[in-house]
Amino acid sequence: MLNDITIGQYYPTGSPIHKMDPRTKLMMTFLYVILLFFANNVYSFVFMFLLLSVAIKVSKVPLSYILRGIKTIVFIIMFTVVLNMFMTPGDNVLCQWGIFKLTTEGIYNAVKMAIRIVLLVCGTSLMTLVTSPISLTDGMENLMGKVPILKNYAHELAMMMSIALRFIPTLMEETNRIINAQKSRGADFESGNLIRRAKALIPVLVPLFLSAFQRAEDLALAMEARCYRGGENRTRLKELKYTYLDRYGYMISFFMIAGVVTLNVFGVYLL
Amino acid sequence: MSVKGINLSHTYALHSIFAFDALKDINFEINDGEFIGIIGHTGSGKSTFIQHLNRLLSPTAGHVLLDGVDINGDGIMMKDVVKKVGVVFQYPEYQLFEDTIYKDIAFGAKNMGYEDIEGIVKESMELVGLDFEYYKDKAPFNLSGGQKRRVAIAGVLAMKPSVLILDEPASGLDPIGREEIFENIKTLHKKKNLTTILVSHSMNDISNIADRIMVFNEGKLEMFDETKNVFNNIKMLGNIGLDIPESKKLLLLLKERGFDVDTDLYKEDDVINEVVRVLKKG
Ligand SMILES: Nc1ncnc2c1ncn2[C@@H]1O[C@H](COP(=O)(O)OP(=O)(O)OP(=O)(O)O)[C@@H](O)[C@H]1O
Ligand SMILES: [Mg+2]
């Protein structure tokens, strides 16, 4: 159950994508997400799909790892699809119950939304799978430092994020351990209705929270004991550096923009 | 209750680049009422092994049999297995969650569907040396480390297992706490004739208590023999980064200096008697 969480899980294969600078990967992912919402016809969606497929292929990350992220949000996707199907105003009504109208525009919108969410989740999953958490936060700190409003909080935000990412595996391990201990005492997490199952989680959540608070306190103490006082004047062990791979990365970014714009505009004629 | 393993293997994260063979083709047989010690270097697979004995992990190959019945077989429920095999994990105090000690110990017993919960809780608390009246309404989180651990062990005993498995029950405790826990385990084994399996990094503790010892090394069962034979195999133990008990070291040193001692001995009491005997002889 817990193994489905792919956020913060790094899958090292040593591919060129892994070796790229985290800033490039962040920018490209950001751009990809924005373009997903600009894409408005079949051709641009196919183009976005192909881009991601090539990226996955090059990264050598198994497809199953990327698709795992989808499993956890199937619910959200279904909800969005249903909402879009019945709530989109349109003229071409197929059938109607009260205020709910099923229109061709609605179906079209719903399909578009579903494709967007799936590609968005796969794209961002891919980024976390090919970037180690440390370099990811380094990249974020660096990029946020360049945005005027975020500048003053860049270090704190990045530190919070890296601590959170750092503790995901630890807390998952801890959760697993506690689940094992309670299963050994006959706790049953798999049967019964929703309320019973929620109740069954109490023996896991109580010890988990207790130990999480304890850990947070220990960590804060340890950081203070070593005179941590924010980002000022801190130097780093590994400076971020662009290489030729990043030049390709940015070139591909322009190709992405050009591709979507062109296909959006000329898609009308191609149809 | 007897426990048997046939060609038991376990691979973590099977079919991925993280795949890791944690157990490799393990065969063993533990008889009813025996006291088994498990030793092995960090990461040798001890915890992975014991999780197979109550079905928290299923073997990627091979079988685990309880009294001849495959615990992963068709129609066997998880509940039937944990009822028979009680496992106390490393740092079991992290499993406490109720607001009173009574409720926490009763958790397992209730899950097993037992009737006389109060009687069972009382008995379990007495077995680990906790006064029922004094402790039952206290909150488990205010106890000392050693006391918390005893509450956790009582919580497992309340399920009335026939096999008791303890993973490093004394780690992180002070010497008195250690001694008390081991005394508890010893009396438990005697009183209830529980088949007991104890994982420990301390050769001293293991040597005083185990009938037979399983030696794990890199996922393989390197040796499974009587305590005496295992500790006579000093070279093999050294090769895989393990040691012999201090008591036995003393005898070997005495022998080196020309005293005529029986170096097969290893239990503290036996060793003391042997040294006294030799000293008296002059
Ligand atoms: N959930 C898991 N996924 C992948 N590998 C694991 C997992 N749990 C344990 N391992 C690996 O399996 C090996 C055996 O681990 P195990 O916990 O059984 O060792 P151990 O003998 O109990 O060690 P220790 O004495 O430190 O408790 C280790 O190398 C460990 O890294
Ligand atoms: Mg262990």
Image (spheres, coloured by chain):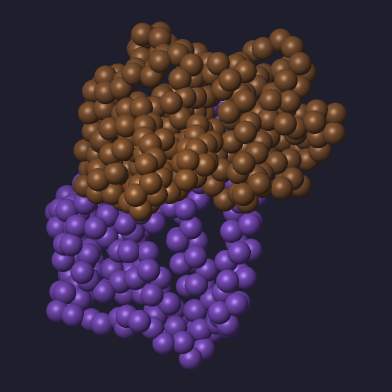
Residue B223 appears in the rendering: yes
Q: Colour of chain B?
A: brown
Measuring from the top left, give residue B65's x and y in whole percent.
36, 14
Please report the residue visible at 58 percent of the width from the left and 82 percent of the height from the top: A227
Corner quadrant of residue B237: top left
In-front residue for pair A151/B239:
B239
- Above or below residue B33? Residue A182 is below
In-front residue for pair B142/A182:
B142
- Above or below residue A250? Residue A197 is above
Corner quadrant of residue A138: bottom left
Measuring from the top left, give residue B141's x and y in whole percent.
73, 45
Please report the residue visible at 68 percent of the width from the left and 34 percent of the height from the top: B151
Along the horizontal axis of the image, is A53 left or right of A199?
left
Residue with the most extreme front position: B282
- The chain that appears purple in the image is A
Measuring from the top left, give residue A107's x and y in whole percent.
37, 38
Please report the residue visible at 73 percent of the width from the left and 25 percent of the height from the top: B126
- Above or below residue B281? Residue B155 is above
Please report the residue visible at 56 percent of the width from the left and 43 percent of the height from the top: B170
In-front residue for pair B66/A254:
B66
Residue A86 appears in the rendering: no
Measuring from the top left, give residue A209's x and y in whole percent.
63, 49
Residue with the most extreme right position: B133
